[in-house]
Amino acid sequence: MTWQTHDGVEVVHMAPLEAAGGVAAFFTGRRGGVSTRWDGGLNWSVSIGDDPARVAENRRRTLEILGLTPERAAIAGLVHGNRVAAVTGADLAPAGAPGPRVIPDCDALITNETGLALIVTAADCVPVFLYDPVRRAVGAVHAGWRGTVAGICAQAVAAMSREYGSRPGDIIAAVGPSIGPCCYEVDDAVAVPLKAYYGALAGHCLSPAPGQEGKYMLDLWEANRQDLHRSGVVSAHVSGECTACGVGRLFSHRAEAGTAGRGAAVIALI
Ligand SMILES: [Zn+2]
């Protein structure tokens, strides 16, 4: 995964997807925006008290990297569930109306239309990027722990198969910047449902927190990679960028005590 700056906007490119050609996939850092509440200013969320005009400018700058306007983008509403929405041009904002259009009640978006950007926002939750270079389809997934144990990645892969004929073995996946196993301590409220969904595989994702009874370090990167693997996705890469460790460049809900801005996972067929 590669950091790059585009006219001041810092993003992490999902190199394994982009290397296949025909796709742009990146996650935004915090630098290059105009919001005043956060260092770097590149907040993507309108639901955390930021000035909507500044957020709109941040979104415009980000999408300019793709040569797209916000009207050509769809953003997932995010409800920590496992619903996937298939997006077409008809779902986008009409000409003259401001974009991106919010697609409600879903945590993952898929499309097979070129020049249509799919977006999920996050600040510690796991963004997962999906690209099928054979059937020309993409997906953007928001996987916090609730979405992860609800199988959001498996649901997104299944939806790409159903809607576009994607074979899971053709899909290239990348787990983007998010809270890492170094910084994500959880208790049984998370560990119990995780074990219920993953069974024996949970041992790959959970380890006891040193010296703390009933606490665990959770590796949501590996959890989502395992979910992708058992869905048939062979090529699943992990960026390894921890948002909490990297809070100077990325937004982190935990590292900023709940006051963080939000980054954006952006993917589009180009
Ligand atoms: Zn960390």
Image (cartoon, grey):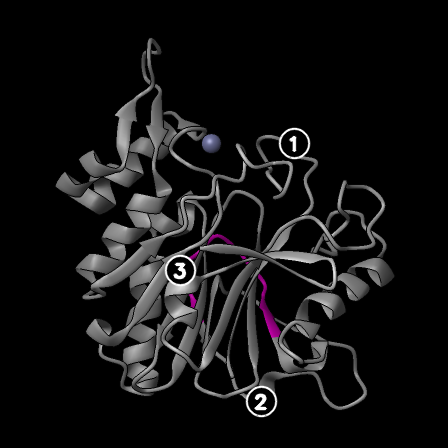
How far from the left and from the top, in percent, is residue 133? 34, 81
As shown in the figure, which amino acid type bears the numbered disc 3?
A: Asn
Marks 2 and 3 sit apart, C-alpha to C-alpha, by: 23 Å
Q: Are marks 1 and 2 in contact (CB under 8 Å)?
A: no
Which is nearer the eye, 193 or 69? 69
As shown in the figure, which amino acid type bears the numbered disc 2?
A: Gly
Counting residues from the N terminus, which is met first, the one under dot 1 or under dot 2?
2
Q: Nearer the viewer, mark 3 or mark 1?
A: 1
Give the labeled residue for mark 2. Answer: 89
Label 2 crowd bin: few (<14), some (14–19), many (20+), radius 10 Å: some
Residue 78 is covered by the magenta coloring: yes
Give the labeled residue for mark 1. Answer: 256
Question: In the image, what residue occupies the spot 42% across and 37% down?
Answer: 180
Residue 31 is covered by the magenta coloring: no
Q: Which of marks 1 and 2 is in front?
A: 1
Residue interval drawn in magenta: 74-84
Q: Up-down: is 217 above or below 120? A: above
